[in-house]
Amino acid sequence: METEQKYRPAPPGFTSEQWDTFNEDGIIFIEDAISDEDIGTYKHAIDRAAATNPKYKPGGYLGMENIVERDPVFTSLIDHERHVGYAYDLFGELLKLHQSQFFLRPPGGKQYNIWHPDGARALPYGVFSPQLPLQIKIGYWLTDLPHEKMGNLVVLPGSHRQQYMDGYDTHNSVSGEMIVCPRKGTMTVMHSSIWHRVEPNESDVVRYNIFVAYCPSWVTSADRFHSSPKWLETLNREQRIIMRSYSHAYHNAKPPASEFPLFLDRETGADADAGTYLEHVQLHRRKRQTMHERIAEI
């Protein structure tokens, strides 16, 4: 099918090695993914947002959600070339922004998190999707965390394949856990079902962090019902689509024809998979394979 140049090829995503590690451990670490200049830009944007929050007290803890609507710096993360290809590899043409958030975790040791997976609790994502995640979370680590007890993320590698663990709803250390001590500029890609918690911050460093999570469009959003129509008008095409702010509920499962293609194939530049449908089938009614499906066929 002929495709106009207005569409973008899908940005880079998982390498084969990263995909193997992601499936085995439930998380991958990409060091030096974020430049010092961008780290400074993101931290300044966090400080700006914090300063306008009436509940924030300087030097205190703060977590904010739906940050992409709060500052153009955060808006750029919706479809950022640095990471959106990882999400596209999993969720393809129905890619959706699930949640965007930042955290300021100051010294003090009080703000920590108990063991949990992301997403639904009473009926977890893994019940329906035991292999592939129904959400992935991209982490931007903007502070050096070389030691434990700095507000570190703690994960249990491989636990995305299990729906029960004895540490659930506690902050207890468990056998096999990994206390993540990233350099600033590291990016993580995390499976929604991996069990994780957050250490207290007993250092003299404020932990700056951004998380951007993605899911299929038919999974409910975590931080909004609808986006501001005026704000949506400021977005580029891909950003607007990925926000999935529809007035018709079923469009989350069956988006309108104007939403296709979201991205072109990164290798071929095609807007559809070759040899799968007769020519009369409209583009928005065609299934396109995800990276996982293509690998499975090899």
Image (cartoon, rainbow, N blue to C red):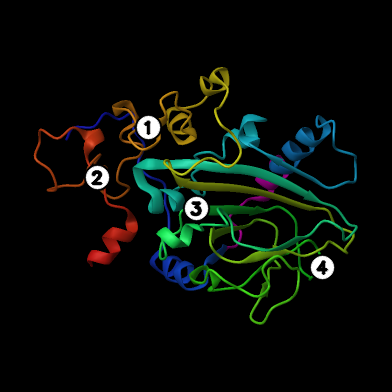
Residue 250: mark in rendering: 1
Asked if the magenta segment contains residue 38, the reply would be yes
Q: Between 272 and 101, which is closer to the camera in this rendering?
A: 101
Categorize mark 4 by other alpha carbons within 10 Å: few (<14), some (14-19), many (20+): some
Over which residues does the magenta segment extend? 30-41
Residue at (47% x, 29% y) in the render: 240
From the image, state whether disc 4 or disc 3 is nearer to you: 3
Locate residue 96, reporting x and y percent.
Answer: 46, 41
Mark sitting earlier along the chain (1/2): 1
Of the numbered discs 3 and 1, the one sitting upstream in the chain is 3
Whether 159 is among the magenta residues is no
Q: CA distance from mark 4 to mark 2?
A: 46 Å
10 Å crowding of disc 2: few (<14), some (14-19), many (20+): few
Of 293 and 5, nearer the camera is 293
Closer to the eye: label 3 or 1: 1
Instruction: Residue 287: give its label.
Output: 2
Mark 3 secondary-structure assignment: loop
Q: Label 4, label 3: how many angstroms apart (C-alpha)?
A: 27 Å
Mark 2 and 3 residues: CB-CB less than 8 Å, in contact? no
- State which tag comes first along the sequence, 2 or 3: 3
Q: Earlier in the sequence, mark 4 or mark 3?
A: 3
Marks 1/4 in contact by CB < 8 Å: the verdict is no
Classify the position of the N terminus by image quarter. top left
Q: Is residue 181 above or below residue 207?
A: below
SS at circle 4 = loop
Residue 182 visible to the viewer: no
Q: Secondary structure at mark 1?
A: helix
